[in-house]
Image: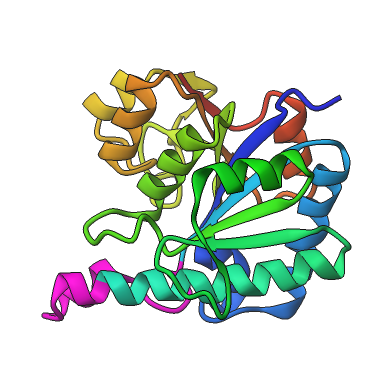
Amino acid sequence: MPKYQRILLKLSGAALAGESGFGIDPERLNELAAELAEVVRAGVQLGLVVGGGNFFRGLDAAARNMDRVTADHMGMLATVINALALQDALERHEIPTRVMTAIEMRAVAEPYIRRRAIRHLEKGRTVIFAAGTSNPYFSTDTAATLRALEIHAQIVAKATRVDGVYDRDPEKHPDAVLYPEISYHEVLSQALQVMDASAIAMCRDNRLPVLVFNFTVSGNIMRMAMGEPIGTLIH
């Protein structure tokens, strides 16, 4: 029996890219869709936010002297590419899916309307929220938190390539310590690079828990939905 009835799952664009780190790897996409489909069939109402870093990172482009607003809008469009790919993969696993975009592009997706998104979830459809918040200077972490609050998700689950939140970067420091759970205040005060500070602060102010877990371990998405003790719980 799933612990959570409604989950907002935040995926990075790299989750679709496989080992190359760029573009979309069809095999990786299919594996991810299969795991998500299993969670939906278990009765979980699933909202997804996927990044666009496998195609374009607005912040990186801005650092190379591109106008930040333009770069961020390009990054938002990259998330739409990923959302459409994920929708196609989920529907091949017979999971009805809707893509809703914060920037209107009616030829390819529905515009984001909060009440319609909730209705889709209630009808058992998976909803992928694309194009961020439509506003520059906000990351997909912030978009995921905002959508989670709007659809009354019980938790934000952030899928990463590490096992959870560490006291320092585990890829650079082998002796880094994993926190099974941690408070919002500790994440902010220690400047732990988990999510944007604005996203953590929004979760704190609205008492929305965040679970950071390793999605590359097969079965972990289902374990997260079932409430098994994996990753790091921020609360």
Q: Pinpoint residue 96: horizontal percent, then vertical percent.
A: 80, 59
Residue 174 counted in the magenta span: no
Residue 216 visible, this orientation: no
Q: Is residue 70 above or below residue 221?
A: below
Position of residue 47 measured from the top left corner of the image (x, y, whole percent): 62, 46
Q: Is residue 219 left or right of 147 when viewed as pictured?
A: right
Above or below for 37 versus 69 = above
Kindly identify the residue that appears in the image at 31 percent across and 36 percent down: 192
Does residue 102 appear in this view?
yes
Relative to residue 220, is residue 105 depicted above or below? below
Is residue 209 or residue 118 the one in the foreground?
Answer: 118
Residue 15 lies left or right of residue 104; in this view the side is right
Seen at 40% across and 49% down, the residue is 143
Q: Nearer the viewer, residue 21 or 124?
A: 124
Q: What's the residue at 36%, 72% (across, down)?
A: 75
Q: Percent from the top left, x then y, of residue 217?
A: 72, 49
Q: Quadrant of the C terminus?
A: top left
Q: How many marks?
A: 0
In this picture, which residue range is highlighted in magenta? 52-71
In the image, residue 158 sits, relative to residue 203, either above or below, namely below
In-image side of 130 versus 26 (left or right): left
Give residue 121's position: percent from left, percent from top. 70, 43
In the rendered image, the quadrant that contains the N terminus is top right
